[in-house]
Image (spheres, rainbow, N blue to C red):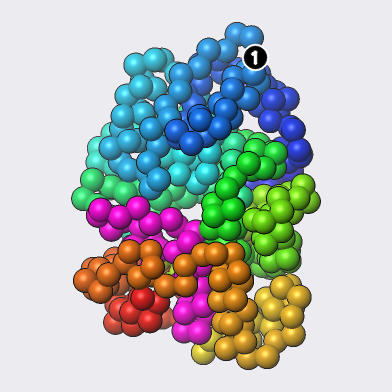
Amino acid sequence: MISYLTRVHFDENILEKSLCEELILAEKTRPLIITDKGVTNAGLVDRVYNALPKDCSFITFDETPANPTEASARTAAQLYTNEKCDCLIALGGGSPIDLAKAVALTVTHRGKLVDYAAIYGGVAKIANCLPPLFAIPTTAGTGSEVGRGALIIVNDGRKLGFLSPYFVPTAAICDPTLTYDLPPSITAATGMDAITHCIETFLAPAYNPPADGIAIEGLRLSWPSIEDATYKSSTQSRRNMMAAAMMGAMAFQKGLGAVHAISHALGGLRGKSLHHGTLNAVLLPHVIRFNAPACENRYPRLLEAMGYDYNGVEDFVSRIIERTSGLGLPSSLSEMGVMLNDVDTSAMNAEKDHTNATNPRLVTTSDYIELIRNAL
């Protein structure tokens, strides 16, 4: 077991034993399971059911949208209250885990959800009274199982970040066997999310050597493993990717940057359901090029972790593009459905995003317009 920010159980086939232990330790008997239809249809909720102590009864909410919304959080929170639940189990990728955090906030705090967003000073408003949350990732990407943040589309359509140390789950149960049956496209997209976390947080300007070390090791594990996990799904590559996802999130306590600022803005576009990890994969080369004047001195260490010599910014960019293409992911935002008339509003929202403040180079709305246009 690992204790870093929270308790982490990490091993193959550890789900049943670890979840049972955590629920007994917390003395909780009425969990609300937050998940989605894909996880339910894959039979993974059955594994959770088999892990529950004998005196536990559970309720399931499996209507999590691809990008969690305030409306879904309030629906699940009402279910939590009506059914007299006493804890939350988040089972799935980043969306169910983030939604569970929003549910925990909603059942314990009054007022508009937007008031608790980071950009509105919400961090200080979130009190230490959230119900226990046990996070069980079924993808290897966001690392939300050890993260202090949640991304939620609020009722006005914006995708906002909610941050609090009290959002860090009570315990994370990382069982790589839960990812074995993921389709290649999801493995690739979530894996590039983990890789982006490791790269972007390493480049964030805050002084945090432990986070830097964790990010570099996460990149060293994930870069050679992502293709094997996508196309061959070997046991070791799946383990490495789940570890890298966890490590990227451990490290981004340090901060993220412009890749995520744009991804968050585009992820909130009405009428679209854009995958966060895929957005990151498309945007990462453009932001690496943009940030070079401020942090190129740190690029050689990233390339070393990836197994290459450093031969300049464009070589670094080409490595990312080549890997993304090899994974079958889109190479442009237009392939994902982003249009020219989406640019201006998304750029303004990106500048306001909480991750913009920790980008190594100052980024204005006009810079974001150019970055998004270049990625189209």
Estimate how packed mark 1 is, as few (under 14), some (14 to 19) or many (20 or more) residues with alpha carbons within 10 Å: some
The image shows a total of numbered marks equal to 1
Figure check: 272 above or below 16: below
Report x, y in % for residue 80: 39, 22
Residue 359 vs residue 122: left or right? right
**Residue position marked by numbered label 1 in the rendering:** 53
For the point 45% across and 35% down, the residue is: 36
Q: Amino acid at mark 1?
A: Pro
Residue 164: percent from left, percent from top: 46, 47
Q: Is residue 261 left or right of residue 29?
A: left
**Which residue range is magenta in the image?**
262-291
Task: Let me know if residue 134 is in the magenta part.
Answer: no
Residue at 47%, 79% in the rendered image: 286
Identify the residue at image location x=32%, y=49%.
153
Give the percent coordinates (x, y) of residue 68: 37, 44
Q: Quadrant of residue 307?
A: bottom right
Asked if the stretch drawn in magenta spans residue 273, the answer is yes
The quadrant the N terminus occupies is top right
